[in-house]
Amino acid sequence: MSEEVENILHREGITLASIKARSMAFFIDEMLLSFILVFALWDNFSQAKNIEEMINVTNMFVLEYMAMKIFYQAFFTMHYGASIGKIMMKIRVIEIATLHNPNVLSSLNRAIFRIISETLFYLGFLWGMFDPAKQAWHDKTARTLVVNV
């Protein structure tokens, strides 16, 4: 993290969210979206006779699930600065340049690169654990930080 950004955060009394809080928010969001997926596809899941058929149902809708995740993350980040999981963990996303909620393009960029990071074995999330500003790949590309409320 640059010294200029550190100075701005210090001056504004803003602290970075912990990896633990971010991980919990991620878990909450994943559980919520998984329940929504199962609810939406309940007819398909209820007709599955075994685990293999359930996996096949899930695989048939993987692109729709990714689109749902992108929409969810982009919408909540743009409008509230946080997903439901982040709201529950009392953390939020801010643009580095403005210290406000990310705009439409930044939110969409962040959501798309979040999915890319997930598909690449969560390497972008792992990166964030060792980054001084705790920025995962999706934070770096969108120029955002996750901070405490």
Image (tube, helix red, strand yellow):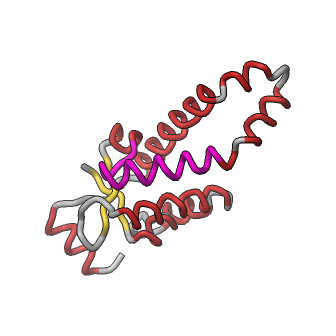
The residue shown at (24%, 65%) is 99
Q: Is 95 left or right of 37, judged from the image as shown?
A: left
Q: Quadrant of residue 44?
A: top right
The residue shown at (82%, 27%) is 51
Residue 114 falls inside the magenta stretch: no
Count of numbered circles on the image = 0
Q: Is 95 left or right of 31, judged from the image as shown?
A: left
The span picked out in magenta is 64-83
**In x, y percent, where is residue 104?**
37, 62
Above/below status of 28 relative to 16: above
Above/below status of 82 relative to 119: above
Q: Quadrant of residue 102?
A: bottom left
**In x, y percent, where is residue 76?**
38, 48
Q: Quadrant of the N terminus?
A: bottom left
Pick the residue in front: 43 or 4: 43
Q: Is 6 left or right of 39, judged from the image as shown?
A: left
Q: Is 44 left or right of 80, judged from the image as shown?
A: right
The residue shown at (42%, 69%) is 142
Above/below status of 6 relative to 149: below
Q: Quadrant of residue 60?
A: top right
Residue 81 falls inside the magenta stretch: yes
Q: What secondary structure characterizes most of the magenta part?
A: helix
Pick the residue in front: 84 or 56: 56
**In x, y percent, where is residue 46?**
73, 19
Q: Which residue extends farthest left?
A: 11
**In x, y percent, where is residue 24?**
46, 41
